[in-house]
Amino acid sequence: MTSEFDLICIGSGPSGLRAAIQASKLGKKVAIIEKYKFVGGICLHAGTIPSKTFREAILSKVSKNKKIHRYAGYSFQKFFKRVQKIVNDEVNVNNDQLSRNGIKVIYGEASFKNKNEIIIKSGKDTREIKSEFFLISVGTQSNKPNYYNKNNPHVILSDDIFSLKTIPNSISIIGCGVIGIEYASMFSKLGIKVTLIDGRHRPLEFLDSEIVDELIYQMRKSGVEFKLGEKVKDVLLDKKGEMNIRIDLECGKKIHSQLAITCVGRVGYTSNLNLESINVNLDSRGRIIVNHDFQTSCPNVYSAGDVIGFPSLAATSFEQGRLVALNIFNKNYHKMSANFPVGVYSVPEVSMVGETEQSLTKNKIPYEIGIARYKEISRGIILGDINGLLKMIIHRETKKILGVHIVGESATELIHIGQCVMELDGDLNYFLKSVFNYPTLAECYKVAALDADNKLKI
Amino acid sequence: MTSEFDLICIGSGPSGLRAAIQASKLGKKVAIIEKYKFVGGICLHAGTIPSKTFREAILSKVSKNKKIHRYAGYSFQKFFKRVQKIVNDEVNVNNDQLSRNGIKVIYGEASFKNKNEIIIKSGKDTREIKSEFFLISVGTQSNKPNYYNKNNPHVILSDDIFSLKTIPNSISIIGCGVIGIEYASMFSKLGIKVTLIDGRHRPLEFLDSEIVDELIYQMRKSGVEFKLGEKVKDVLLDKKGEMNIRIDLECGKKIHSQLAITCVGRVGYTSNLNLESINVNLDSRGRIIVNHDFQTSCPNVYSAGDVIGFPSLAATSFEQGRLVALNIFNKNYHKMSANFPVGVYSVPEVSMVGETEQSLTKNKIPYEIGIARYKEISRGIILGDINGLLKMIIHRETKKILGVHIVGESATELIHIGQCVMELDGDLNYFLKSVFNYPTLAECYKVAALDADNKLKI
């Protein structure tokens, strides 16, 4: 059988895009199938990029040291205008990259006919294309709880936030995952009353627990109310003054707000792909199960990005896509490093690399910690971020860095210094001996290292 | 001879402070002599900290994407209020550290009686103290050109900027070193007309030349006028409307402005130390000549910080002070790494580590460069800093990182990632294989690495 293509990527988000570009650079014939009108995936159109642009717009409007402004009733589209421009710019950048690399983009919805052939539907047109390899990079969509109803404009999915017309004066956010936490912290900075509800007793359990405590503390200070360990029974239309919505909790409490946003998990966008026909295994949330090489249970079909689950970050999806292409075509393949950073773009932002205190304790690995608070650092004082915190976890015997955890301004940038020392096998001495620009937040590494060093001497 | 002290540090700036703390942690008896009423040195009272706080105040007032505001006539003290609070906080932090470590602080002016004894004058009091070792960490002061006259309030030294009452509508800055460049770029962001004058044809020649070009380009766009290769003949009082000052250049041009600030180099604060008596050698600008171990020509007397010249950065001074104490008392001494970062807190900020293209070309080391512009990076687009630039210099054969140069937002923070890879002997592959948080400015490293990798394949 001769195939038209060496690789077809279904979905043009970070992993599909990067796999296509990498394969094309290796001289392969590549196509991308995109069901929407634009390339970029959820990252570009409803996820990472719009939410981070929205976040930046909020932070530039709400000066960190001043009283919180009230933006209720303000046009959401004013914030969104800048988002739309940036999204368009990014779409153009992506299109340029695709055409420069000779990658064919086919708009339409794909489903598998067999393991080497897909059917693409676009309006009334249908076509079939063959490829030796496939990458399923279709992403995820918001899970729709039973109280969700498309015709009720006051209960929306997190994917639909950017179609809001005005900023409500109160929001209930159901679901305390990364997306729920990020939006809750952003809206609260606009002076909106935000209530966060989750059946779990702790949010973001993959993060170090002290960092989560600090984040919750700061979000509460910004006005977010946490209802943890509380299950939602129903969400009802119940107009009272400016309130539209009533959330009934199982314990009997009722929460009123103008808008409810549900962020209760995401499910794989896989239902229309006809994956049964090629025996690709899925988990209970429609996500694709892969091995360490991102290979599905159908050997010539790979999968990467959000649709394969944790960590579901644009950054890791890019790298997964690149590795898939290298792996399929046997070029300089390497496994993905375990030292990848995780970033949560809440306000304050959070980032981590490596192990948490909890995972080390569980695995009985002896460690010591070093802590630096931004308020001890000149740059922190100058910026006025006195709540920021950097925690370094060091192996008691080898002095290797086991993990770094940061909450506060620039956390997602600063984490890369710790990541680098971990990946290049440096240890505590690196931080003790290095010169850091003064004043910078990066000095936290030095202060935390000195703190750990003092403790290790005891 | 028994000495009262093991080490006396003359001057309580970064190097004196850190040497004293390190020696005290080694169990030594230590004193600091400070001629002013507060510890901290020029870094804290007229240099790094006030200027960086002033910079932050300007940036938070002048939104990056909007038309530049005019602040002429505005109270300088309003900006300064925050500076004063932060300086006070830092003084308290320093005092805490000193007393926690049992370090004696003696206020007064020191001069050497002999190599183991100093005389301290404080008002009418005089006392003598002995010590086995000394560290001269007295810093530098603004050089006073012949046209400078203390009684003319319209021509000031860079050390005196923070005693200004109001913000002038036009400033001539004489001297294009780091200090001149930093203040010129800050004032121009306030909408002040700034003219920068220097006899040299290029400013900041220790930086990579492409980065300087970008900095000059951006400063010109902010309204700074550069008069390079122009020698100042005289500065005269010449009141005309709002203008107070006329600068006559040797070529015959005349420049009018409300205020002139001279930043024409700095001289060692050494004239009253009676260094002749102990044979400590000085250079032509009164700075102390030391060997690689920061030892002067008098073996028990060391010197560190600005008073020994380049790089004259608070960050390197801290480390020099620490190394002096370790060296004197023979504990874990190591030489200072050559991979220290240099930061220029101009707007935009600049930072570098390692070699420049110019130094490598001179030494005939074959290299390739990789460039990432902030405008190619999602985070750069979101922040609206589309002029930022990261340049990585890679050895053509070994693929080692020889230097990193950044101009743009967060340059002084981002540089530490490159520094870490250089110091821990990583190479281009580190950046090709690592995952970076998305969206971050740190992604520039990946983009620059891919750029270099493509060029290296040709």
Image (cartoon, coloured by chain):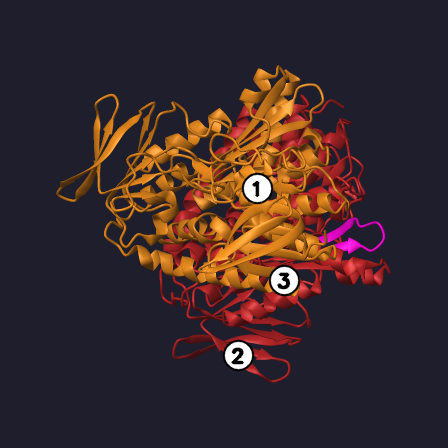
Chain colours: A red, B orange
Amino acid carrying mark 1 in the image: Leu
Name the element at disc 1.
Answer: helix
Asked whether residue A403 is drawn in magenta, I would say yes
Amino acid carrying mark 3 in the image: Gly
Residue at 54 percent across and 24 percent down: it is: A100
Is there CB contact under 8 Å for labels 2 and 1?
Answer: no
* Residue that carries the numbered disc 2 in the rendered image: A255
Do dots 2 and 1 share one subunit? no
- Is there any visible trace of residue B312 in the rendered image? no
Residue B368 locus on image (x, y percent): 60, 21
Direction from residue A415 to residue A394 in the image, left or right: right
Chain letter for the residue marked with disc 2 in the picture:
A
Overall secondary structure of the magenta section: strand
Residue extending furthest left?
B241
Chain letter for the residue marked with disc 1 in the picture:
B
Relative vertical location of residue B448 with respect to residue B68 in this rendering, above or below: above
